[in-house]
Amino acid sequence: MKIGIDKIGFAMPKYYLDIEDLAIGRNANPNKFKKGLMQLEMSVSPVSQDIVTLGSAAAYEILDSSDREKIDMIIMCTETGIDHSKAASVFIHNLLKIQPFTRSVEIKEACYGATAGLNFAKNHIEKNPDSYVLVIASDIAKYGINSQGESTQGAGSCAMLLKKNPKLLILNDDNVFHTRDIMDFWRPNYSKYPCVNGHFSAKQYLDCLTVIWNEYLKRNSKTLEDFEAVCFHLPYPKLGLKGLQSLFPESFTKEMKDKFLKNFESSIVYNQKIGNIYTGSLYLSLLSLLENSNNLKSGDSIAMYSYGSGAVGEIFSVTLAENFKKSLRIDRKTEFSKRHRLSVNEYEKIFFEEITVNEEGNFDLNNSDDSIFSLEKIENHKRIYKSNIKK
Ligand code: HMG
């Protein structure tokens, strides 16, 4: 049975910061961010947007009423949880009006979570061939004002619908995964921002890639030439480029390298405008590749490198389905152009605003957010969401 991703949806907040403005605001050379990290813009999320609203909007983009009747599992993958107990997917289940006999959970392992989510979804469909599973990767990456990682922040969500005989791509059975206990990036429960050992984390990302890639080639008797493209977890695009270059065997000609480099360019178009979205970053890159490359055809294989700090990494491959192009949007770029560009002062005010409940556990956002889903208020410690879906 062929199992894979039928559709991918994406949602981002309506604000962004131009990375050049950030560089000027921080007295840094803009080329450090634009060339050194290959980042151009960063998505900025207001307090009325969280993993639930972004995740719901990403899923809303792709689901029709028949999908809502067939989905029987929603897996939220995030490291920006809004509650230590209740899974964010339970809120999403309600906002999207998914049929009631559904399993809803949340899983975590830094940026790797969504890859585990896809595997769990695949196993579920193997046992229940008529099931549809919604896997949502939703995160808001904040490192703090003037921090070393500030230029790699971002916010957004990817929603993936998995089923048998998918229209977009098939998940192959060739996964190789790897765990190593390191402290490269972590987020203690008591801390607002992550603890980051920046240069060490980049080194670990690249070292895990080498270790897993070599094992992947050995176990699956493959070479890089079996693929048309490689997609990477992209904390910032330059690290993915370094990763790709590290995979080129010495025997590779310029022509062979150029094929991969061209597809790499397509795979970073969206990430360069969004920044790091942790769990969703690899899948945003995949969406970017599929919607921006003009040299892919059905049957082509793409290698995927997932990395989550801590660390867990995985390499697996996907094969493009027949007529996969019909499952993609051609107008996504207009969504980016509708965003509102913030000044550095506005960004600092909006991105770092916090929810502070009063003694009764209330906080009114005075919500004027016209997004399809938004957080309206906290009432007696309960998050109340607003849906602008027209009945
Ligand atoms: P930094 O230390 O301030 O920057 O922050 P830098 O000095 O290393 O410079 C960055 C690059 O710009 C360098 O290129 C410079 O040479 C270059 P490289 O040597 O690396 O090729 N540069 C310039 N280029 C052109 N013109 C100039 C110029 N100036 C400098 N004028 C750092 C960089 C990555 C440390 C920081 O952004 C950070 O801490 N980021 C957060 C951590 C991170 O993203 N780590 C990535 C791997 S871990 C991961 O992927 C997991 C993660 O997503 C979390 C999760 O799993 O949940 C983060």
Image (spheres, rainbow, N blue to C red):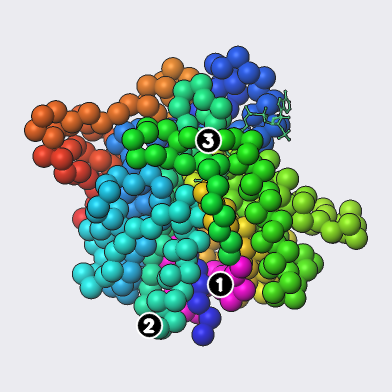
Looking at the image, residue 106 lies above or below residue 352: below
| Mark 3 vs ligand 1: CB below 8 Å | yes
Q: Secondary structure at mark 3?
A: strand
The picture places residue 223, in percent across and down from the top left corner, at: 78, 68
The picture places residue 165, in percent across and down from the top left corner, at: 50, 79
Q: Secondary structure at mark 1?
A: strand
Q: Secondary structure at mark 2?
A: loop
Residue nearest the observer in this picture, 294 or 42: 42
Circle 1 crowding by C-alpha within 10 Å: few under 14, some 14–19, many from 20:
many
The numbered mark, 3 or 2, whose residue comes first in the sequence reads 2
Residue 90 placement: quadrant: bottom left
Instruction: For residue 204, say whether it is visible.
Output: yes
Looking at the image, residue 144 lies above or below residue 167: above
Q: Amino acid at mark 2?
A: Asn
The picture places residue 216, in percent across and down from the top left corner, at: 68, 68
| Mark 1 vs ligand 1: CB below 8 Å | no
Q: Alpha-carbon distance for marks 2 and 1?
A: 16 Å
Residue labelled with disc 1: 171
Circle 3 crowding by C-alpha within 10 Å: few under 14, some 14–19, many from 20:
some
Residue labelled with disc 3: 196
| Mark 2 vs ligand 1: CB below 8 Å | no
Residue at the image point whose x is 42% and y is 78% from the top: 125
Residue labelled with disc 2: 128
Q: Alpha-carbon distance for marks 3 and 1?
A: 32 Å
Of the four image quadrants, the one with ligand 1 is top right
Task: Report the span colored magenta.
Answer: 160-176
Residue at the image point whose x is 56% and y is 72% from the top: 171
The numbered mark, 2 or 1, whose residue comes first in the sequence reads 2
Q: Alpha-carbon distance for marks 3 and 2?
A: 41 Å
The numbered mark, 3 or 1, whose residue comes first in the sequence reads 1
